[in-house]
Image: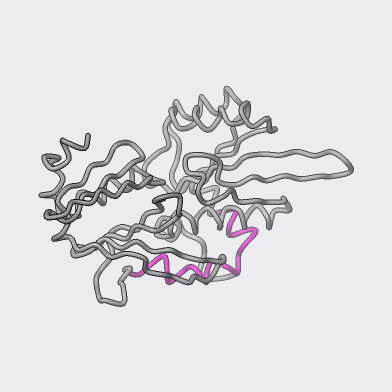
């Protein structure tokens, strides 16, 4: 057996989109037909899986949540409603963490399948035992850019309809466009914003508004894929800009 087993911490350090693709790959290994949804479809379904045996076809929707904290009843209820809206056989929620007691009750009530972190790693070690090594170094070191800057936040976002990665360091905010397969990536830097040029930041649920350049203000509007995780990292990016004074006229 491979000494480099799949671990929760390893999964938490993956990019959210990497995690989604890994979950899709897992179901593919389990014998399902898998299809990841379009990258711009934020807030919706991450993965569709189906199986067709002797003319009997079944289809499920899978939501992948790379969380460190428990998934609550609100999210379980929200994703559970997709089974009625999308007319599928069921919904599966996969998380690196766990579910609250109310979340589990909600799942049982609507026949939503819940896969928590320990079960997920067990499934990965069973169906993908030789692939954990490819992610092992990535799940353990510190993310450092070629500039030498240490990254404390990397988040999936959408700006003007384009899917990007929003990368936060102490000095800069980077917009990266990534073309990826499961085990390789090609990164393209499409914008770099100096922290000193940011005159305002405001987060509103899934939306982020960035105001830059005091002389000629420009407002950038982004949609954030995992707002809870992003909010924690945003506190580390120039906290003096988070008071909201600059953005009052934009609110």
Left or right of residue 224: residue 34: right
Residue sitting at 80 percent across and 39 percent down?
Answer: 57
Q: Is residue 91 above or below residue 173?
A: above
180 sits left or right of 173 in the view: right
The residue at the far front in this view is 216
Q: Which residues are magenta?
A: 122-141
> Image check: 156 left or right of 247?
right
* Residue 231: percent from left, percent from top: 28, 45
Compare residues 209 and 144 and report the one nearer the observer: 209
Q: Is residue 171 above or below residue 89?
A: below
The picture places residue 212, in percent across and down from the top left corner, at: 19, 54
- Quick one: quadrant of the N terminus? bottom right
Question: What's the colour scheme?
Answer: one colour
User: If the image is split into quadrants, where does the C terminus sit?
Assistant: top left
Residue depicted at x 12% and y 54% = 214
What x and y, as percent, mark residue 89? Answer: 70, 32
- Magenta stretch: includes residue 131: yes
Q: Nearer the viewer, residue 163 or 104?
A: 163
Q: Is residue 183 above or below residue 237?
A: below
């Amino acid at each position: 057996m491979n000494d480099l087993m799949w671990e929760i911490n390893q999964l938490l350090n993956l990019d959210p989109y990497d995690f989604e693709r890994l979950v899709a790959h897992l179901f593919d290994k389990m014998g399902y037909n898998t299809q990841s949804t379009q990258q711009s479809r934020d807030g919706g379904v991450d993965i569709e899986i189906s199986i067709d045996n002797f003319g009997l076809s079944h289809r499920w929707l899978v939501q992948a949540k790379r969380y460190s904290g428990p998934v609550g009843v609100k999210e379980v209820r929200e994703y559970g409603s997709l089974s009625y809206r999308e007319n599928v056989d069921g919904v599966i929620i996969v998380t690196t963490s766990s579910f609250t007691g109310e979340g589990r009750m909600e799942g049982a009530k609507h026949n939503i399948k819940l896969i928590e972190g320990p079960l997920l790693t067990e499934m990965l070690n069973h169906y993908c035992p030789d692939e954990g090594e490819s992610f092992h170094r990535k799940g353990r070191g510190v993310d450092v850019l070629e500039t030498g800057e240490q990254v404390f936040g990397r988040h999936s976002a959408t700006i003007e309809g384009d899917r990007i990665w929003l990368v936060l360091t102490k000095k800069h905010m980077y917009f990266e466009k990534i073309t990826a397969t499961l085990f390789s990536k090609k990164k393209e830097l499409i914008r770099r914003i100096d922290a000193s040029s940011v005159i305002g930041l405001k987060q509103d649920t899934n939306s982020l508004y960035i105001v830059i350049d005091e002389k000629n203000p420009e407002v950038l509007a982004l949609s954030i894929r995992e707002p809870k995780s992003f909010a924690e990292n945003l506190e580390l990016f120039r906290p003096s800009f988070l008071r909201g004074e600059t953005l009052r006229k934009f609110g």
